[in-house]
Amino acid sequence: MSRTVLVTGGNRGIGLAIAQAFAKQGDRVAITHRGSGAPDGLFGVQCDITDSESVDAAFAAVEAELGPVQVLVANAGVTDDTLLLRMSEEQFTRVLDTNLTGAYRCAKRASAKMLRAKWGRMIFISSVVGLSGGAGQVNYAASKAGLVGVARSITRELGTRNITANVVAPGFIETDMTAVLSEERKAEILKSIPAGRMASPDEVASVVTWLAGDSAGYVSGAVIPVDGGLGMGH
Ligand code: NDP
């Protein structure tokens, strides 16, 4: 059965791979972008997830075109790394406002329609860093750890209504976000990954489409690492 899927930040990187994987299996897929436009074959809505009016308008546009969102993939996220001593409060709150509060805004907007339909899937894209921490990433790690609390609380609130909420925690994936790492840092990271390589965005997408499907209906409140063994299951 084809479903209406919304992927935030689905215009590039991991989000785009996720959106394309859903489209390939026949779902109706919408993505958010902040002005880049939509990639071919996907329905695009402009949305800044730090602004609840913008989130509301994006959901309304998706509903008008494709119907209520049945699968939400809260993927959009940013980094702004620096050591704690140098991290300004603005740097901390800006990353939290996008990665954590942004996911809350989308989940809240999606939940009303999911409750009415008595079916829904919410998938939050966290990070291995949310569970293990990362030097220079107090803001990012806090935001990504927070998603675990969000998904688990939603599971408790909405579990009886056929609504699941799960977290996917990628390790190092080849996208614009990791392209900025120095070769030195990349070599260092590779040494710590049991798989000995970074992953392609498609390897995250396949886990997300599985979580959204009927066969994963009894999986909720889970954190699923996609990290080549880096976090050893955490
Ligand atoms: P990219 O930097 O390639 O893409 C980030 C996406 O988020 C873009 O689509 C961007 O939109 C969107 N975005 C950022 N801020 C906002 C905002 N305020 N409102 C709406 N959209 C926004 O990242 P990746 O594809 O690498 O990462 C995707 C997710 O996966 C992120 O949450 C990231 O933290 C997580 N992740 C990534 C890992 C990696 O190794 N790459 C590892 C672990 C987790 P725009 O194009 O308009 O800027």
Image: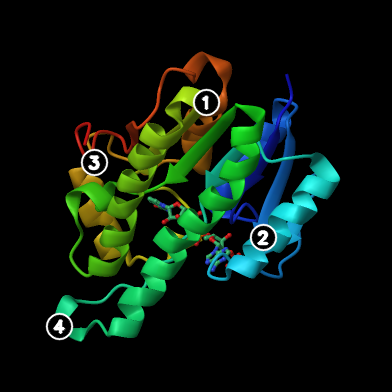
The kind of residue tagged 1 is Arg
Q: How is the image coloured?
A: rainbow
Question: Which of the two discs, 4 and 3, sits closer to the camera?
Answer: 4
Question: Which of the two discs, 1 and 3, sits closer to the camera?
Answer: 1
The kind of residue tagged 4 is Leu
Counting from the top left corner in percent of width and height, residue 4 is at: 71, 36
Question: Which of the two discs, 4 and 1, sits closer to the camera?
Answer: 1
Determine which of the numbered discs, if any, sits on residue 56 in the image: 2
Identify the mark nearer the N-term, 2 or 4.
2
Quadrant the N terminus occupies: top right
Q: Does label 2 point to a residue whose CB lies under 8 Å from ligand 1?
A: no
Identify the mark nearer the N-term, 1 or 3.
1
Q: Report the Cα–Cα distance between label 2 and label 3.
A: 39 Å
Q: Report the Cα–Cα distance between label 4 and label 1.
A: 45 Å
Question: Which of the two discs, 2 and 1, sits closer to the camera?
Answer: 1
Label 1's element?
helix
Q: Where is mark 3, residue-wise? A: 193
Q: Where is mark 4, residue-wise? A: 85
Q: Residue at x 35, y 83 (%)?
A: 90
Determine which of the numbered discs, if any, sits on residue 161 in the image: 1
Q: Residues within 10 Å of mark 1 (few under 14, many from 20)?
A: some
Q: Residues within 10 Å of mark 2 (few under 14, many from 20)?
A: some
